[in-house]
Amino acid sequence: MIIFQLQVVEITKGSKVKYELDKKTGLIKVDRILYSSVVYPHNYGFIPRTLCEDGDPMDVLVLMQEPVIPGCFLRARAIGLMPMIDQGEKDDKIIAVCADDPEYRHYTDIKQLPPHRLAEIRRFFEDCILLVFIIKHKFCSTFFFFHGILNECSDKKNENKEVAVNDFLPSETAHEAIQYSMDLYAEYILQTLRR
């Protein structure tokens, strides 16, 4: 089993505060407060030295008993991949377990998790993304309505709003996705050095 270092940067388990790594400063900033009563079900972050097609590092949700502070490193084992589409773009998530948590470290594949846990994870991402879209779309529509400009919010991104969380894929697929994102990162670094 592959155990990797993870830097949790966006949200701790049970929090509504979404943090994000500011690429210019290297500091962690507050991106937003989640809408409604939605909270992250587990610690969420990224795998360092990876790059995905969206230009960001590989996202990962780490199952463990306790929340951890943003910016800390922990050892995790990928147990599956959650293929996801957000606003028409690929936005897959690695599902992992903390390698040092006695409650979760024995899991080696996503199929070993209880069905309720998988439903909880799926529902969180579906609801969270949809809520962000609805709130932004309502604000935009209201703003332009009051300013006498109709249909300004119906750009392609809003018209084609799609949130799709597909079936969870096994740990082997997660390992392949991580390796691919590491290769993309290495290629990006090489291209940057050649400039």
Image: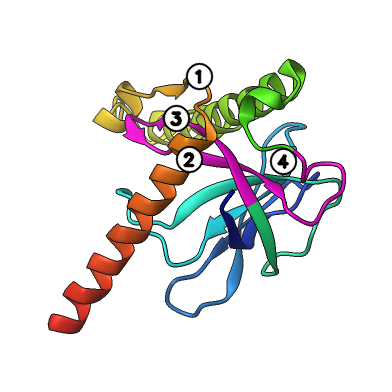
In the depicted structure, whether residue 146 falls above or below residue 24: above
**Residue type, label 4:** Tyr
Give the residue number, with chain letter if any, for mark 3.
Answer: 83
Tag nearer the camera, 1 or 4: 1
Q: Nearer the viewer, residue 195 or 158?
A: 195
- Asked whether, in this view, residue 148 is left or right of residue 134, the answer is left
**Residue type, label 2:** Ala
User: Please, what secondary structure does the residue beneath circle 1 have?
Assistant: loop
Q: Are marks 2 and 3 in contact (CB under 8 Å)?
A: no
| Number of other residues with Cα within 10 Å of mark 1, as a class: few under 14, some 14 to 19, many 20 or more | few
Task: Find the distance from the CA under tag 4 to the CA under tag 3.
Answer: 18 Å
Q: Nearer the viewer, residue 38 or 166?
A: 166
In the depicted structure, whether residue 193 falls above or below residue 169: below
Task: Find the distance from the CA under tag 2 to the CA under tag 3.
Answer: 10 Å
Task: Find the distance from the CA under tag 2 to the CA under tag 4.
Answer: 21 Å
Residue 42 position in % (x across, y down): 74, 43
Residue 78 within the segment the image draws in magenta: yes
Give the residue number, with chain letter if any, for mark 2.
Answer: 174
> In the rendered view, how is the structure colored?
rainbow
**Residue type, label 3:** Pro
- Asked whether, in this view, residue 127 is left or right of residue 163, the answer is right
Residue 40 — which label? 4
Residue 137 within the segment the image draws in magenta: no
Task: Find the distance from the CA under tag 1 to the CA under tag 2.
Answer: 13 Å
Tag nearer the camera, 2 or 4: 2
Residue 86 — which label? none
> Which segment is the magenta one?
77-106
Residue for point 68% across, 61% down: 75
